[in-house]
Amino acid sequence: MLKKKHFFLVVAAVTTLFTGCGSFGGISTDGSSEEKTVAATSAAILDILDALDYDNVVGVPETEKAIPDRYAEIETIGAPMAPDVELLTALSPDVVLSPKTLESDFSESYTNAGLNSAFLDLSSVSAMYDGIESLGSYLDREEEAQALVSDYKTKIEQYEETQAEDISVLILMAFPDGFYLVANETSYVGDLVSIAGGTNVYPSSDAEDDYGFVSVNPEDMVQTEPDVILVFAHYSEEDAFSYMEEEFQSKEAWQYYEAVTSGNVYYLPSEIFGMSADLNWSEGVDYLQKIFTGGQE
């Protein structure tokens, strides 16, 4: 029995893009030639700004992830999941950029503080590049944005020629505190699996609120007969993976999975497979294609 689990940290497949040619995330783009000041609350968005050759960033997140050198001395504005609104208000950027998944958490506080904000959809690779096009227009970086989109389209065409065939895949997102969720094809990792040619045994559901993740017990999942099981960590990779290894070894239900008994369980590194899309997405597709073709240990 499939049980939908509301989980605010996972990816929601929704979009904040241009509306016509006059706004970005509800912010007026009146044609001013003055370069806008930007605060970014995620490392992935910083990487996009860097790729757009954009310097006028006034706030960056406190993160363990590497950030582009050009932003190394910029003032930090708090953790990605908890930006400091007081600091943001003091910096008074023209726009605060955050992931769309966190819009429901941040938008009200931004509005109450008088901050303009826009939320980029990083739920899939294609959605990210739609956002890059819109952001490029808003920041007067159309040429740079189009170069990124052109490179993306070229890579997608190449992957279509090298996709795996007839590989069914079960994707599990593991938590270090002892549970897991199934990732369907609307999750970011699910999107990478689709690009690589794998077939998710749990496609997207009709529900608007599953956010790409559902809870299913192993007794029900065994009926899907996956060729491959992929595991990635929501956080604390070492502990999350240790939990899943114990789960596979100790729970009898998993012994009915040929993927488990034949060793076709793969643990995906967090530095490549995160919760949301980033510009290194093709590294993830390459990694998956090696698994699907038997070339990844």
Image (tube, rainbow, N blue to C red):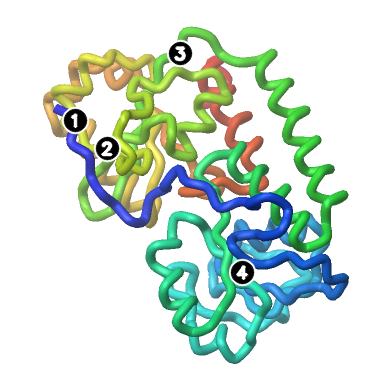
Tell me, yes or no, whether the two marked residues, 3 and 2, touch with CB atoms within 8 Å: no
- The residue beneath circle 4 is 40
Image location (x, y in percent) of residue 84: 48, 82
- The residue beneath circle 3 is 167
- The residue beneath circle 1 is 2
At x 25% / y 49%, what residue is drawn? Answer: 6
> Of callouts 1 and 3, which one flags the residue occurring earlier in the amino acid sequence?
1
Nearer to us in this view, 15 or 244: 15
Q: Look at label 3 and name its amino acid.
A: Ile
Tell me, yes or no, whether the two marked residues, 1 and 2, touch with CB atoms within 8 Å: yes
Q: Look at label 1 and name its amino acid.
A: Leu
Q: Which quadrant is the N terminus positioned in?
A: top left
> Of callouts 3 and 2, which one flags the residue occurring earlier in the amino acid sequence?
3
Nearer to us in this view, 206 or 266: 206
Nearer to us in this view, 168 or 138: 138
At label 4, counting other C-alpha atoms closer than 10 Å, the crowd grade (few under 14, some 14-19, many 20 or more) is many
- Frontmost of labels 3 and 2 is 2
Tell me, yes or no, whether the two marked residues, 4 and 1, touch with CB atoms within 8 Å: no
Image location (x, y in percent) of residue 42: 56, 64
Quarter of the figure with residue 148: top right
- The residue beneath circle 2 is 214
Inter-mark Cα distance, 3 to 4: 38 Å
Image location (x, y in percent) of residue 45: 63, 59
Q: Look at label 2 and name its amino acid.
A: Val
